Image: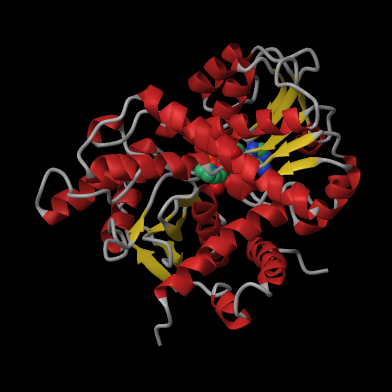
């Protein structure tokens, strides 16, 4: 049987939403949203510190700008494909519309293994991408941000490359979000996605009569999103019993010593050998008993092959596309509460929007203001999706997709028809 790709899954989710919307919008117009507005493949030829010129593929996909300029992170991974980036751009369109920010959906990919690049060579790759993708990157066209394999530091390099190519030390308007605060970034952006995941997970637990205090949590992926969501859930009173990264999965049913684990990762860059937990197989960690399982790594981690053995009560999708449509069905029938990615990890793009407006208006927001607005927006949109799902007897993912796609269709109708 053909392996389902991220794009297959994104289109399957879209088709379910399209079916729910068929009586509200003209099917031709909904069909328009199946197709990205633009997919570009770019060849980067950076010169590394070994003196050699290396060939690296990169992609920029703008899925839809019906609601506003395309927004979406840059993924640096050795196996990222143009179709993956298309799926992720499409999901950004629904995510922005659902969380209520005036952006469309976009995404970039750079085919490179960031863990194998030196810091200098990675900087060269990011600057090479920026120079070659410059025509796409603009506050009114496409505004990138961090995603897997890229970070705040890389967003600083992007701002620097663009501003100096324009001839100034800074830019007018926000060309990139997720930057260091000193370069026009916003306090709390680095934590925003993980904090949003924790807030959404706490709301889901309440709906099933549980509480974050004492809840057992397992987090897959210990990068930006995973580590922060683990920390924030622990601050809310949860007991983090398992975490994993690409190198190791560690588990302790009595709870991990999270500060010690974080210190180990800060020192060594990986979870291998981390204190307070026993190393187990990656796949086994997902199947351990817990109240919240937060997949915060990559796509297609919970599939028809393992969904049956998942014991979590709530799945909080920090990653994009971690659950396949087949697994969705199995988990739904088991009564697992799934917080779909376009809702669960939307805190990052919401705070990116605050950064964008702050930079456009040359204002500064405090970390506290950002945190309060993020938590409020996550709770409001969670409730909206939950009420829609409950009233219509739909799965949370269908309700979230319905609301997101509906907002984009409404924008298309408001714009009228362009040939
Ligand atoms: P990151 O690069 O900071 O971290 C990724 C983590 O996942 C690393 O710890 C890596 O070792 C681990 N990992 C990779 N493959 C794994 C596997 N098979 N099993 C266990 N761990 C594995 O990336 P990030 O920014 O934290 O992004 C993680 C996910 O969250 C991605 O799906 C991304 O699209 C999504 N996301 C990120 C943001 C953001 O603001 N950074 C926003 C929305 C969604």
Name the colour scheme. secondary structure
- On the rendered image, what quadrant is the N terminus found in? bottom right
| Ligand 1 located in image quadrant | top right
From this viewpoint, is residue 385 visible? yes
Q: Position of residue 274 (x, y in %)?
A: 64, 18
The part of the image, by quadrant, that contains residue 139 is: bottom left
Of 286 and 346, the residue lying toward us: 346
| Direction from residue 408 to residue 69 in the image, left or right | left
In this view, the residue farthest toward the left is 167
Of 48 and 145, the residue lying toward us: 145
Q: Position of residue 161 (x, y in %)?
A: 22, 49
The part of the image, by quadrant, that contains residue 335 is: top right
| Direction from residue 79 to residue 169 in the image, left or right | left
Q: Position of residue 406 (x, y in %)?
A: 58, 63
Query: Residue at (71%, 34%) from the top-left corner?
Result: 204
Relative to 265, does residue 319 appear above or below in the rendering?
Answer: below
Of 418 and 172, the residue lying toward us: 418
In this rendering, the count of numbered labels is 0
Q: Position of residue 299 (x, y in %)?
A: 65, 51
Query: Residue at (76%, 50%) from the top-left corner?
Result: 391
Of 151 and 228, the residue lying toward us: 228
Relative to 225, does residue 135 appear above or below in the rendering?
Answer: below
- On the rendered image, what quadrant is the C terminus found in? bottom left
Query: Residue at (78%, 24%) from the top-left corner?
Result: 210
From this viewpoint, is residue 249 visible? no
């Amino acid at each position: 049987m053909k392996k389902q790709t991220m794009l297959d899954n994104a289109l399957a989710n879209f088709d379910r939403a399209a079916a729910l919307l068929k009586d509200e919008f003209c099917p031709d117009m909904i069909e328009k949203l199946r197709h990205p507005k633009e997919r570009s493949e770019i060849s980067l030829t950076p010169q590394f510190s070994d003196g050699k010129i290396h060939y690296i593929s990169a992609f920029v996909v703008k899925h839809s700008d019906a609601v506003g300029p395309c927004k979406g992170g840059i993924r640096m991974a050795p196996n990222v494909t143009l179709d993956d980036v298309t799926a992720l751009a499409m999901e950004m369109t629904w995510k922005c519309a659902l969380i209520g920010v005036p952006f469309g959906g976009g995404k970039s990919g750079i085919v490179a293994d960031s863990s194998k690049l030196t810091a200098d060579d990675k900087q060269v790759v990011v600057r090479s991408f920026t120079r070659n993708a410059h025509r796409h990157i603009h506050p009114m066209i496409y505004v990138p941000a961090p995603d897997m394999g890229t970070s705040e530091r890389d967003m600083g390099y992007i701002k620097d490359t663009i501003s100096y190519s324009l001839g100034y030390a800074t830019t007018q308007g926000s060309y990139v979000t997720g930057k260091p605060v000193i370069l026009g970034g916003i306090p709390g952006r680095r934590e925003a996605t993980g904090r949003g995941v924790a807030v959404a997970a706490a709301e889901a637990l309440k709906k099933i009569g549980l509480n974050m205090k004492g809840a057992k949590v397992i987090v897959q992926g210990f990068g930006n999103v995973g580590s922060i969501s683990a920390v924030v859930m622990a601050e809310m009173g949860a007991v983090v019993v398992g975490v994993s990264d690409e190198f190791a999965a560690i588990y302790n049913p009595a709870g991990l010593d999270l500060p010690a684990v974080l210190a180990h990762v800060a020192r060594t860059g990986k979870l291998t050998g981390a204190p307070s937990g026993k190393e187990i197989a990656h796949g086994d960690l997902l199947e351990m008993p817990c109240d919240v399982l937060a997949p915060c790594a990559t796509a297609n981690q919970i599939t028809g092959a393992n969904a049956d053995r998942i014991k979590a009560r709530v799945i909080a999708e920090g990653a994009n596309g971690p659950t396949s449509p087949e697994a969705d069905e199995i988990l739904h029938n088991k009564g697992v509460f799934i917080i779909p990615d376009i809702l669960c990890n939307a805190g990052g793009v919401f705070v990116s929007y605050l950064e964008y407006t702050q930079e456009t208006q040359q204002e500064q927001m405090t970390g506290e203001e950002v945190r309060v607005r993020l938590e409020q927006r996550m709770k409001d949109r969670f409730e909206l999706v939950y009420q829609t799902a409950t009233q219509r007897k739909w799965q949370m993912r269908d309700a979230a997709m319905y609301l997101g796609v509906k907002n984009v269709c409404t924008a298309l109708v408001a714009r009228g028809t362009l040939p």
